[in-house]
Image (cartoon, rainbow, N blue to C red):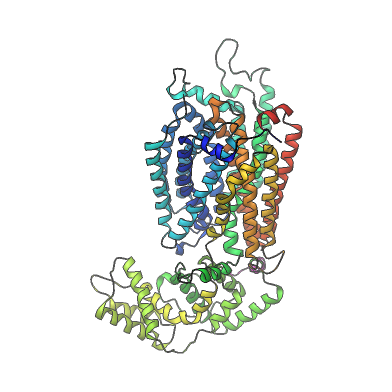
Amino acid sequence: MTEAKPGFLAQIKSYPSTFWVANTMEIFERMAWYGFYAVAALYLTGPVETGGLGFSSVERGQILAIVPFFLYIFPVITGALADRYGYKRMFIIAFAGMIVSYYLLGQAKTVPTFLLVFMLVAVAAAIFKPVVVGTVARVTNEGNSSTGFGIFYMMVNIGGFFGPLLAGAVRGLSWSYVFIACSAWAAINLVIVLLFYKDPTTEAGSRGARTFRKVIDDAVEVLGNLRFFIAVFVVLISLMIPGFQFPWFGWPQCWLFIGCWLLANVVWDLMLAKGSGISVSAGGTRRFPLLKRMHCSNWRFALFLLILSGFWTSFHQIFLSLPVYIRDYTDTRRMVDLGRAVFPGIDWLAAIEETQLLGEFDRLARQARALEPMAKEDSAEPPAPRGAEQVAALAGSWGLTDESLARLDELAVRLSAFGAKTPITAGDLMESARVMLQYKVRIQPEELGELLAAVPAAPQEITDEQVAVAVATVSKRLKEKGGGEFAGAERDELEDALRGLMSAGPFPAAAALEEACARLSRAERKILPEDLALGVRDLAYRSVIWARVDAGRQVNAEHIINFDAGAIVLFQVLISFLMARFHRFTTMIIGMLVAALGNVLYAVAGGTMLGPVGGLLWVVIAGILIFGVGGMMASPTSQEYVGRIAPRDKVATYMGYYFVAMALGHLFGGLLSGEMYARFAEKAGRPDLMWLFFGGLMAATAVIFVLYDRFVLPRKSTHEQAG
């Protein structure tokens, strides 16, 4: 137990105005970052038709590993520059950069361009991070820092709560609004820092201010010399390359290169003269960096950061893996049912991509009947035959037993009896059900097959209400293209055209669609077959499929994850106040063990350890809340520890190094997320194995910290500096 701390209210009153300004800026910066980052996995892997980028899980993992890695590495330098040139100046540069780069991020559509622009976001965020944490560390003291960092972590999660909430709302309209909102939050921060922020630093205006070179040297020498940094950095860069699937540098070549590189560095050190690690030679001349031996000046701190990276590797899965896991494996319709009971006036189907969902249903229905697509944009190569391994992986992802897969095969044969040139298979049904899941509708593959079989081939009676909905769908498409509204005689003509197309049944030919478009088009408004096809699909399939769509409506994954941020907002300050009475390392270790339990609960809810796939939504939510409690204990305590051991004139520099652990966590977490999700969740249908690994990693990190505290830290240092 530590010495008595001031009371809670006394601590709250002790913080200066700069503390609250910094925390306010943290809210808006986190709204910008998490407004995108919480939905990044969904955006990167989402179908292009829904506004996503259509990247693979491995590409997603690479991007979300590499860019955040650099984001958290850059503070090593930006934190040192802030100590030298002033916090306020660095804040202004950071927010100006965020305004521009977040907007440009929404314009990037390929892996290289997205990676480049995302890196610009990282640079701006890396300037901000050590400065805001350094501000909190500078304006707090030993008596109020635990609660102060708890408040700061709560502010992080206020932004982390509202950012994804608003992003989830606006992405239903268009993904571009997500990036516009992120730029807007940065603009608000720019106003705040210009009007209200008072710089707590003193070096920038002092006569003894360091030169730029001295700043860089001091930043590097916290952990070691340049040779040490180069050796480590090359290893980390080499780990980023295999995920891009270059034929000349896969994982075997990567491990071989790392081994050779480390061996070469050791041999080079042995060849150098003894004492060549000294920065300045006897004659007073500076040695060339490559002629110095590798040197780690603060190995205990370096080891602390390396161990802590294990915590962050597992921690970041709440944003790297959990969103796609919830989307793919967790049935959230119970949340929709609860929402409808509490808020009956809300249209819970409003955010569904209706036209794309009906288009996928139409594609499969026409494939089953050997019919040509209605429009050119629907044309696609028939799916390539799937191997037994791919079919087994799809079956695993849906939790299908051998018996249910056999029933699905029988249903596929029945559908193919319609005359398909490319027979419908069980794999087609499972894959199409997976596509519909991207549109936030969960329909089991067998249910989808039954719905396809229920589509009537003969003409059916069409009501005025159905026609009105179809006309509204076509009108919306044309309005988005700048064609204006249908009204009066034009609307009547469109209604007649749609009724005429459906008079022969739900599968009008492409030629009939083109003829109707020619009649409806005007000089000022050209109607294309793909425009009119939207209304035809509405009339053909809505009555067949919409009741099941309504029953399968899912909640946005980022809204489920927000339970974590919401819990932190409500309980972080209380937990930090209570934990301030205990040893910092004790709090960190217990927090990691609690967070590990949360990861284990994700595994239990995965559909292969307990119950059917998607049957355990409340277990997932319980895992998120328990994980959040662990994070509330471990994360702010680890930041406080570094802030307390840092020299007062180098607080931002040391906090910059704290982010190295987060950088490594992002790198390892992103790489492991992409590879393990592809291997265990997508191919093997066993996401539980992935979550058990991350839970085990978190628990192992806690155990290693116990050993670190017992055998590495000097006892005096442990209690006086981290007590």
Instruction: Determine if the magenta segment contains residue 389.
Output: yes
Q: What is the x, y in percent for residue 325?
A: 60, 60
Residue drawn at x 57%, y 56% as measured from the top left: 563
User: Relative to the observer, which residue lies in front, 53 or 422?
Assistant: 53
Which residue is situated farthest in the top direction here?
A: 283
> Dividing the picture into quarters, in which one does residue 617 lie?
bottom right
In the picture as drawn, the residue positioned furthest to the left comes out as 523
Q: x, y percentage for residue 332? A: 58, 66
Can residue 237 be seen by looking at this rendering? no
Q: Nearer the viewer, residue 613 or 634?
A: 634
Chief secondary structure of the magenta span? Answer: helix
Residue 629 in picture, x, y percent from top left: 63, 50
Relative to 534, 440 lies left or right: right
Q: Residue, x 47% and y 82% (percent of image)?
A: 543
Q: Which quarter of the rendering shows the N terminus? A: top right
Above or below residue 14? Residue 406 is below
Is residue 258 found left or right of 360 in the rendered image?
right
Above or below, 212 against 660 in this view is above
Q: Quadrant of the C terminus?
A: top right
Compare residues 231 and 667 and report the one nearer the observer: 667
184 left or right, relative to 417: left
State whether residue 28 appears in this view. yes
Q: Which residues are magenta?
A: 384-395
- Residue 579: x and y in percent read 65, 42
Q: Quadrant of residue 394?
A: bottom right
Q: Nearer the viewer, residue 108 or 250?
A: 108
